[in-house]
Image (cartoon, rainbow, N blue to C red):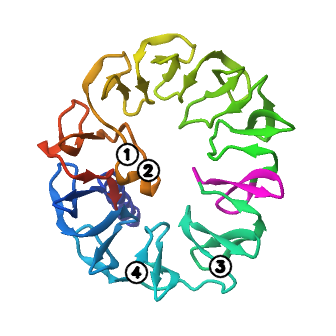
Amino acid sequence: MKTKHFLILTLLTSFSTIFAQELALVREGGNFGYIDTSAKFVIETQFKDAKSFSNGLAAAGQDKKWGFIDASGKWVIEPQYDKVKDFNSGFALVLKDDQWHYIDKKGQSLEIPTTSDKLYDFEEGVALFRSGEKIGLLGTDGKLVLEPTYDVIKDFENGHAKVKKGEQWGMIDASGKEVIPASYEDIGNAWSPNGVYAKKDGVYGIVYNGNFNAIDGAVDVWAFYGDAKLTYAKKDDKIGFVDRTGKWVIEPQFDKARAFSDGLAPVANGKNWGYINEKGEMVIEPKYRDAEVFSDGLAPVKDKDWGFIDTSGKVVIPMDYDITAGLAFLSGKNEKGFIDGLARVKTKKGWGFLDKNGKLLGDTWFENAEPFEAVK
């Protein structure tokens, strides 16, 4: 019987995760509200200031004070703060009476060591912790995960962060473990299971499985993207693609390039962009003024304005749009393509969302629209 009940609970949890509600912050008439993926208002435009949902709560402003609301628009934490950051890992930084401190989702303060010189946002379950000239990691229990050891710890990406000790760079995971020793002149920001680019003794290469694999003649390298097994690098003013062993799989021959996704990568010689496959064959003719990586089977391409093509090169959404980030750049986001079947675009009429058939979500344009965020 217990097994049966456990199975039911597991299924319910799975369904809850799969069908988690998604809301997008939009602005109309100078006020902010939130829509669902049918473009219907779940929370009406009633806030002069608001931010996207994060960790199930969204920051909103009222009478020059900030608090946090849930997916129904109800105040979970009443407006009382002068400034707030987004929730991450269950905690948010808030400013009150000229003092920054952490609160949990009930508004309770997190007690931390008093020696911290500055407070930082949580990411991946940890926050930077500075003491004097050294930086460590703070856990969500208020205790140190990693004693202040490094001179620099950059933002966590894919559960890892680049770190600097003296003049050397390495990489740690969220437990504070050094997964790549701090022994490189430079190292990539983003960890990937296919490798991380680095520079040692003036030579660029890929760090994979504990080994440094030099890339012949490389003068620059970019990070692996998603699950792509190739990344791009530059040699003698031309760009090609290498694998995790540092081998040139596609010889340097392009003026510009971006990452592989869905088996295709945008490349350019001169002013024209097209797409190559993983053999280096040009499979979509270079005729666009700009081109981005594929996502959800479609890629943004530009003539005068932006539209979308499929992996065969067919234009499925006309080039009538702008895809420049709106306010999203303030939160470090700049999603230009399709995400979960929707793409955020702009015209003279405002911001909106297109489905993969090019249909405008809810036939509605907004003064501003931010990317959809899952609300759990």
Element type at mark 3: loop
Whether 171 is among the magenta residues is yes
Which residue in the protein does label 4 denote? Answer: 82
Q: Nearer the viewer, residue 226 or 27?
A: 27
Sequence-first disc among 1 and 4: 4
Sequence-first disc among 1 and 3: 3
Which residue in the protein does label 2 denote? Answer: 333
**Tag in front: 2 or 4:** 4
When asked about the image quadrant of residue 294, the answer is top left
Q: Amino acid at mark 3?
A: Lys
Residue with the most extreme bottom position: 97
When asked about the image quadrant of residue 314, the answer is top left
Residues tagged 2 and 1 counted as in contact (Cβ below 8 A): yes
Q: Residue at x 60, y 80 (%)?
A: 142
Q: CA distance from mark 2 to mark 4?
A: 24 Å
When asked about the image quadrant of residue 361, the answer is top left
For the C terminus, which image quadrant? bottom left
